Amino acid sequence: MAPERNLRLVRDEPLAPAVRLGDIHLRNRLVTSSSLLGYGVANAKLIPYGMSPISQFVPLERFGAVTTRTLTVEPREGHFTTRDQWPLHELPALLKRYGQALRQVDGGWLNAFGWCNVGLDAYLRDYYPRTRGQNTIISVGGFSAEEFVTLIDKINDAVPAGDIAAVEFNVSCHNVNFDFNAIIESVLAEAVPRSAHPVILKLSPDYDYLAHARLAAKHGVSALTAINTVKGLRLDPETGQPLLKNRFGGLSGRAIKPIGLRVVAELRDAGVKLPIIATGGIRTFDDCREYFWAGADAVSLGSATWFASYPGYALSPLYAARVRNLLRRIESYQPPTR
């Protein structure tokens, strides 16, 4: 059942007509990006670790879908931690860890969390049952076709067909130091046919996204997410040392919006027909409309919204009000026909 916090927000608001992207069912055309809202719910009572504080004032049930943090077969510390409960006296240690995995840079954010997550089994046991009021996209990642098959089989066993919007394959993350070009075709060929749920492939602008989109269409993928973060680097100007523990990180936020728009447009120019969920620097209604004009079928809010800069938690309700207003506008918006 959905948290009472969200039920109070949405009880008197009618739900917008549902949207179908092929066989993917969304409540509207506005979804949330992977990792930004953790697992869709937090264990911490005071500090919403793993979730933007803004999300405490936004009805997550009203989004087209909420995408989880990327989940792996086994728990991964990555370059951060799997913990999501921190007592007050350990807050300095938490902030230090954040500083090694997430940095604000010009026009966006650079992160290298490295797929830190509790593992799929723990998610399905401890988190998923508490988010049944949301429409969910489960993001999964692995380093072989066998791992993706295992992930799909576990989701099939635990989640009946139709109970989630889709499973998103993250075969494009730079923060785990792995070349996904070597496995992407085998992943799609072996794991997609086994899925009882629609599959979304997340594309990276740093890989051959046109070739990967064609592979997705060939192997029965239902939709594309464009784009994943852009590989980037920042150095301390005093010491020359990388700002992030992983050295390289994924750049997100306003700085990559022109790249995201280019990728969506190039996919359409190349004749790719699969539905596209666009992400990259989206914050306002005009950002959404730009992506729709470029060829997207839905849009996803990432760090440009959920990691907005504000002093502590004080302005979270204000930023949340902007997100709720954007939700209302998207619910009644009809994208241009192509």
Image (spheres, rainbow, N blue to C red):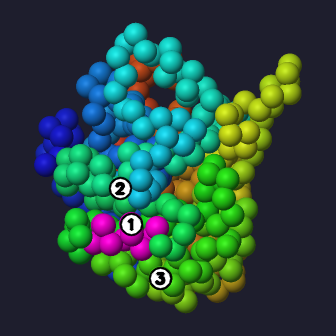
Magenta-span inclusion, residue 148: yes
Q: Is residue 330 above or below residue 196?
A: above
Magenta-span inclusion, residue 46: no
Q: Residue at x 46, y 67 (%)?
A: 147
Count the marks: 3
Amino acid type indicated by mark 2: Leu
CA gap between label 2 and label 3 equals 19 Å
Is residue 82 among the parts visible in the rendering?
A: yes
Amino acid type indicated by mark 1: Leu
- Residue at label 3? 190
Secondary structure under tag 3 reads: helix
- Residue at label 2? 120
Secondary structure under tag 1 reads: helix
Q: Who comes first in sequence, dot 1 or dot 2?
A: 2
Secondary structure under tag 2 reads: helix
Q: Residue at x 73, y 43 (%)?
A: 248
Q: Which residues are magenta?
A: 147-156
Q: Residue at x 41, y 58 (%)?
A: 73
Q: Is residue 209 above or below residue 332?
A: below
Residue nearer the viewer, 163 or 283: 163
Q: Main secondary structure of the magenta part?
A: helix
Q: Who comes first in sequence, dot 3 or dot 1?
A: 1
Quarter of the rendering occupied by the C terminus: bottom right
Q: Are marks 1 and 2 in contact (CB under 8 Å)?
A: yes
Q: Residue furthest bottom?
A: 218
- Residue at label 1? 151
Q: Is residue 139 left or right of residue 41?
A: right
Amino acid type indicated by mark 3: Glu
Q: Is residue 1 left or right of residue 256?
A: left
